Image (spheres, helix red, strand yellow):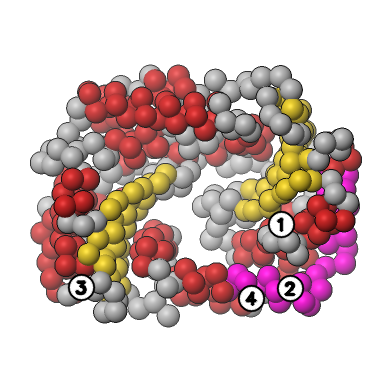
């Protein structure tokens, strides 16, 4: 059980505190309710670029990292389709430094043209390295563009193409900051060994005077229900053929999500999973494979991806996959299979709760969803699952009419630019 206290400042900043007297470190986690789903289709990659730009210095602090490192700390961040998350880890005695730094860049950035040029160059190189020049690097562009037709999950967080990143100017950067980066659009968690009264004072001192902003209502197009199979063939310079299959599934906070999460583990997590045993060990069709859910806040995807052995055709591999799925839908799980995957999931969740960084993020995440105590109750949802729930999820999700299939072929050149 993670104990916490939460409150909201007058300017709308939601704060969650978790004290751990046994720790010598502290973690701050600041989650902004903005991700790549909030971008315009004509200018994608913005949320991710802005994450980088946030480390370029604020109005009063030329370099974000230097004071933190002098305090013995470290920082990092990530962007996904649903949020942008910043965290700091440092000795508990220097916690004030992290709060000061985060508040100053929330208040206002330096907005230097040289800094923008630097970060555009960094993100451009990241795009080239991981999405253009890396084998299978264009996979996510292909996957999302095929699976989604309306929702802004159609493009990956890095952006649709390089020209969007290269075309970003300072006016657009300022507009993005003013539109999304506000105390009433953020969730701050502080975890570690601290004096609560002192931390509350620091938070009020550093964040309390930052102005509230009018955040526009999020009005995203709803993805239509997919009613027929989609299939494409893609050629690229890779060493082996690959098969990718995606199915639309539940949103992260939906009641049906835990059963679909477990379903993905039943299919592809570990050597004893269904797909591993049948498609790799027994039939020797794939060299490796993975099955996972995206866990996005709007309805997401359950994904199968695997690299084929030489000499195995895409159709042969795909037919075998469908057979495995049909058997699961018809027969369900064995008691041993179900207990093993549930126990592993609950153990993993318990282990996450032992790490301060995970606690800090999860407190911010669940607070952003309106139920901070979800950090404690989510495991109960998994505990209540039965084998029949997983079978029902397989029948509900894993239909051909709900599937998008990519035959990734080892020839030709990449088409993403």
What residue span does the magenta drawing correspond to?
Answer: 318-346
Horizontal and vertical percent for residue 286? 79, 46
Vertical comparison of 284 with 332: above or below: above
Q: Nearer the viewer, residue 383 or 40?
A: 383
Residue 381 seen in this snapshot? no
Sooner in the amino-acid sequence: mark 3 or mark 2: 3
**Residue 110, label in figure:** none
**Helix, strand or loop at disc 2?**
helix
Q: Quadrant of the N terminus?
A: bottom left
Find disc 4 in the rendering and name its residue. Answer: 343
**Mark whose residue sits in front, 2 or 1:** 1
2 and 1 marks in contact (CB < 8 Å): no
Residue 24 seen in this snapshot? yes
Q: Nearer the viewer, residue 284 or 406?
A: 284
User: Label 1, label 4: how many angstroms apart (C-alpha)?
Assistant: 16 Å
User: Label 1, label 3: how many angstroms apart (C-alpha)?
Assistant: 42 Å
Find disc 1 in the rendering and name its residue. Answer: 268
Sooner in the amino-acid sequence: mark 1 or mark 4: 1
Q: Quadrant of the C terminus?
A: top right
Horizontal and vertical percent for residue 297? 51, 52
Horizontal and vertical percent for residue 226? 72, 41
User: Label 3, label 4: how many angstroms apart (C-alpha)?
Assistant: 34 Å
How many numbered badges does the structure rendering display? Answer: 4
Find disc 3 in the rendering and name its residue. Answer: 194
Indicate left or right for 100 with 315 as reference: left
2 and 4 marks in contact (CB < 8 Å): no
Density class for disc 2 (Cα within 10 Å; few <14, some 14-19, many ≥20) is some
Sooner in the amino-acid sequence: mark 2 or mark 1: 1
């Amino acid at each position: 059980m993670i104990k916490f206290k939460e409150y909201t400042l007058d300017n709308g900043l939601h704060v969650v505190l978790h004290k751990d007297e046994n720790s010598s470190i502290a973690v701050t986690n600041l989650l902004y309710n903005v991700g790549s789903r909030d971008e315009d289709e004509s200018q994608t990659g913005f949320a991710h670029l802005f994450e980088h730009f946030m480390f370029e210095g604020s109005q009063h602090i030329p370099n974000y990292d230097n004071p933190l490192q002098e305090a013995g700390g470290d920082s990092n961040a990530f962007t996904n389709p649903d949020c942008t998350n910043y965290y700091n880890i440092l000795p508990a005695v220097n916690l004030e430094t992290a709060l000061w730094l985060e508040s100053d860049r929330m208040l206002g950035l330096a907005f230097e043209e040289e800094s923008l040029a630097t970060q555009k160059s960094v993100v451009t190189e990241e795009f080239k390295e991981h999405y253009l020049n890396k084998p299978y690097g264009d996979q996510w562009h292909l996957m999302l563009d095929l699976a989604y037709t309306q929702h802004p999950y159609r493009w990956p967080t890095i952006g649709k193409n390089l020209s969007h990143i290269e075309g970003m100017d300072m006016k657009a950067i300022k507009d993005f900051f003013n539109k999304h980066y506000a105390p009433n659009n953020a969730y701050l968690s502080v975890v570690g060994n601290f004096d609560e009264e002192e931390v509350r004072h620091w938070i009020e001192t550093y964040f309390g005077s930052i102005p509230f902003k009018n955040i526009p209502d999020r009005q995203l197009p709803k993805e239509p229900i997919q009613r027929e199979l989609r299939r494409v063939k893609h050629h690229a310079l890779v060493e082996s053929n690959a098969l990718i299959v995606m199915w639309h599934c539940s949103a992260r906070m939906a009641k049906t999500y835990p059963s679909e999460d477990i379903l993905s583990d039943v299919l592809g997590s570990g050597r004893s999973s269904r797909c591993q045993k049948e498609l790799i060990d027994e039939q020797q069709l794939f060299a490796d494979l993975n099955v996972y859910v995206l866990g996005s806040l709007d309805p997401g995807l359950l994904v199968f991806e695997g690299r084929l052995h030489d000499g195995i055709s895409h159709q042969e591999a795909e037919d075998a996959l469908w057979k495995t799925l049909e058997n699961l839908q018809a027969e369900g799980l064995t008691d041993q299979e179900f207990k093993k995957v549930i126990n592993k999931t609950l153990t993993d969740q318990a282990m996450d709760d032992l790490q301060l960084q995970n606690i800090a993020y999860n407190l911010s995440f669940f607070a952003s969803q309106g139920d901070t105590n979800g950090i404690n109750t989510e495991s109960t949802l998994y505990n209540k699952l039965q084998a029949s729930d997983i079978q029902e999820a397989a029948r509900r999700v894993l239909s051909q009419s709900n599937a998008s299939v990519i035959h990734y072929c080892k020839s030709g050149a990449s088409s993403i630019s």
